[in-house]
Amino acid sequence: MSKHSCAALIVAAGRGERAPAGTEPKQYRRFAGKPALRWVLEAFAQHPAINPIQVVIGRADRDHFDAAVQGLKLLEPVIGGETRQESVINGLEALREHGPTRVLIHDGARPFVSQELIQIVVGGLEEADAVVPLLAVNDTIWRKKDTDFECVPRDELRRAQTPQGFSFEAILAAHRQYRDVAVTDDMAMAKLAGLGIRGVVGEEVNLKLTIAADFEMAEKIASSAFGEVRTGTGFDVHKFASGDQVWLCGVSIPHNMGLAGHSDADVGLHALTDAVLGSVCAGDIGVHFPPSDPQWRDAPSHIFLEKAASLVRDLGGIIAHVDVTLICEQPKITPHRDAMVKRIAAILGINSSHVSVKATTTEGLGTIGRSEGIAAQAIATIRLPAGVQ
Ligand code: CTP
Ligand code: MG
């Protein structure tokens, strides 16, 4: 690791007691289809000065974490403690063996940290042992005193954000020494240890998901980050061959025939893979996985779809919606529809509510009507940051 490397420590082990109830902790809630923690991690991963990245997660959150971080280069996560402070020290202790000289400590619940802010904090560490983004208070502030109120001069007040940057050994020593003093951020630790603190200007957009109103604001911010909408379509046909099952949309369905093909012949996933590839103008499935290449013989088709989805992610984009139509007389699709939707959502790393699978017959007409094979068509809608080439 480079002597000048700056590690990132992302604390994401909280339970989000003040957040609106949901099926997952707030740091895994999706904004514009992307989990909050992934927004954070992509920002740090993108910054050239940051390496390595250590995340601290809740004991019960491993599945959420794995789903949120697909394809990102991170250290093995460590488990957090009862308080943010305990989670930070767990992360610092784990980072120690990697020998960073500096560390940026950031809340996993602040999804919109910018490259500029990361740079300002990293840069500030050239001259100070502690760098903290601060914001002025613009509202008039009143302190409640029994039934009365007293005005607090707001000029003196600052709101602290993260990432807060530190000399690594100094902040680790501070956390060890003042473990029994309860604090709510790492600047407080730096103060206790007498480190020189440099304040830099924070960003309003770098909000922390805390209460319901923050979630509404975050959805608006996230949505505005993807100005470009694109679509792609795909179509595929496979003919029946002898066999006792067919793979359709990642689900195995018992049948009195199989489908012929080089891979598992999952016509639904093939059409969808082409649709996603089309949305990023990346050729078709045959370009990426030539049928002439023996390594794809009998391959499970989720590999193809995962590759296509990774190309969207590489452009900083998200898959907003996909819709697959299976065209066949047999087998009956309806009993398997929900399983197909769930499977596609899992492969793409998106919510099931953004995946549609439906089926139709051709009323006995033509090749498909004569049950010689199965056809599928698909459409994918993706959103990219405005200006992506
Ligand atoms: N955090 C943590 N470990 C804890 C508590 C908090 O890693 N035991 C993290 C949170 O996941 C969050 C950051 O510290 O990214 C800021 O904490 P906060 O906003 O208070 O999050 P929660 O503690 O999850 O929320 P709440 O206080 O409403 O329960
Ligand atoms: Mg908390």
Image (spheres, rainbow, N blue to C red):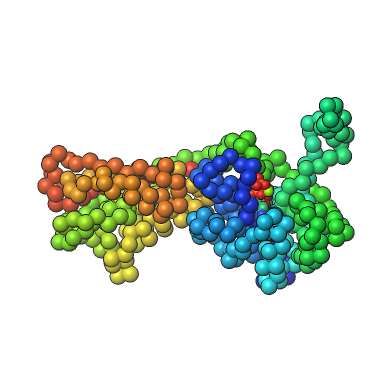
Farthest front residue in view: 146
**Quarter containing the N terminus:** bottom right
- Please tell me which residue is depicted at 84% across the width and 40% down the height of the picture: 157
Query: Would you say 95 lies left or right of 339 here?
Result: right
- Is any atom of residue 131 visible in this view? no
**Residue 161, above or below 176:** above
- Is any atom of residue 302 visible in this view? yes
Estimate the x, y position of residue 375 in percent, counting from the top left: 23, 48
Residue toward you, 39 or 228 = 39
Estimate the x, y position of residue 94 in percent, counting from the top left: 67, 68
> Residue 146 occupies which quadrant of the picture?
top right
- Please tell me which residue is depicted at 32% across the width and 62% down the height of the picture: 300
**Residue 151, above or below 295:** above
Estimate the x, y position of residue 218 in percent, counting from the top left: 60, 39
Residue toward you, 322 or 123 = 322
- Please tell me which residue is depicted at 71% across the width and 64% down the height of the picture: 92
- Total numbered circles: 0
Estimate the x, y position of residue 52 in percent, counting from the top left: 64, 65
**Residue 20, above or below 312:** above
Query: Would you say 275 lies left or right of 201 here?
Result: left
- Please tell me which residue is depicted at 12% across the width and 41% down the height of the picture: 365
